[in-house]
């Protein structure tokens, strides 16, 4: 690691249970607390049992809390690519931001610059596919909203970190939007595409609370102007486009 950072060690860590499996997921979070100091202190409180490998303040300062070889406790109950307990195989980065509860706001340029540099450094050292650069809401869609719809995923993708849809507009004569309570082959196909991309959900042809929550998480990442959990034609087209970019055609 050649970037400047401050060590902020925490006891909230342990050995990775399957080190041979390797690190192949990068998870981005926001701290969701009023100040950076509160967030940093929280992540080294042994009673709270939460932490991340890295934390980036809004002014771009980087803190290292947990060595990457160790398991940080940032993901909680989670699923990505049919694996529960994403902590086992991931690196977690917390971005200082008050979050939806305390005055959610855009992520400053200096913070994004530091994140881009840190993430590029991480990707150079670990084999993390672009589709495995995810937000906390992607891996825990029924519990989490972060880093949220104001996070600049497009900028990260331009820097070679993660994926972003290009030119995936709503097709003409699109099928009706899928909303809560819908059933049938169209629902099943949408669920299957979400599952193939990496999301954890049942593919049962019923658009219930789980499907709605996962659709909302997908939009929060990839269609940030519309975060309503409704799978309209554009949302489904973006998903198919991303599957193709990830080498997993629908």
Image (cartoon, rainbow, N blue to C red):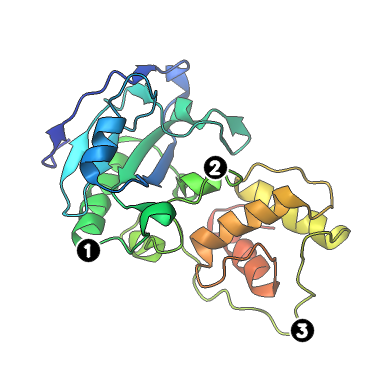
Q: Nearer the viewer, residue 133 or 40?
A: 40
In primary-sequence order, the first of circles 3 and 1 is 1
Q: Is residue 192 visible?
A: no
Q: Quadrant of residue 153?
A: bottom left
Q: Nearer the viewer, residue 176 or 25?
A: 176
Asked if 107 appears above or below 35 in the picture, the reply is below
Q: Which residue is mark 2?
A: 139
Please provide percent x and percent y for residue 185. Answer: 87, 59
3D distance between C-alphas at marks 2 and 1: 26 Å
Give SS at disc 3: loop
Q: Which residue is mark 3?
A: 173
Q: Nearer the viewer, residue 250 or 139?
A: 139
3D distance between C-alphas at marks 2 and 3: 32 Å
Please provide percent x and percent y for residue 152. Answer: 37, 63
* Mark in front: 3 vs 1: 1
| Residue 109 circle label | 1
């Amino acid at each position: 690691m050649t970037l400047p950072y401050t060590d902020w060690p925490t006891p909230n860590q342990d050995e990775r249970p399957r080190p041979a499996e390797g690190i192949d997921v990068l998870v981005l979070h926001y701290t969701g607390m009023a100040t950076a100091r509160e967030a940093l202190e929280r992540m080294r409180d042994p009673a709270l049992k939460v932490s991340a490998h890295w934390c980036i303040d809004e002014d771009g300062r980087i803190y290292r809390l947990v060595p990457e070889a160790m398991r940080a406790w940032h993901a909680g109950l989670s699923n990505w690519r049919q694996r529960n307990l994403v902590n086992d195989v991931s690196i977690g980065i917390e971005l200082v931001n008050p979050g939806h509860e305390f005055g959610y706001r855009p992520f400053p340029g200096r913070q994004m610059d530091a994140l881009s540099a840190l993430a590029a450094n991480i990707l150079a050292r670990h084999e993390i596919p672009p589709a495995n650069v995810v937000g906390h809401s992607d891996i825990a869609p029924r519990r989490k909203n972060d880093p949220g719809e104001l996070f600049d995923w497009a900028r990260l993708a331009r820097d070679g970190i993660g994926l972003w849809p290009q030119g995936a507009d709503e097709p003409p004569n699109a099928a009706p939007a899928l909303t809560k309570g819908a059933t049938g082959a169209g629902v099943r196909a949408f669920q299957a595409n979400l599952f193939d991309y990496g999301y954890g959900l049942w593919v049962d042809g019923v658009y219930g609370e789980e499907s709605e929550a996962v659709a909302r998480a997908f939009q929060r990442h990839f269609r940030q102007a519309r975060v309503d959990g409704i799978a309209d034609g554009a949302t489904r087209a973006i998903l198919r486009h991303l599957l193709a970019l990830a080498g997993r055609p629908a």
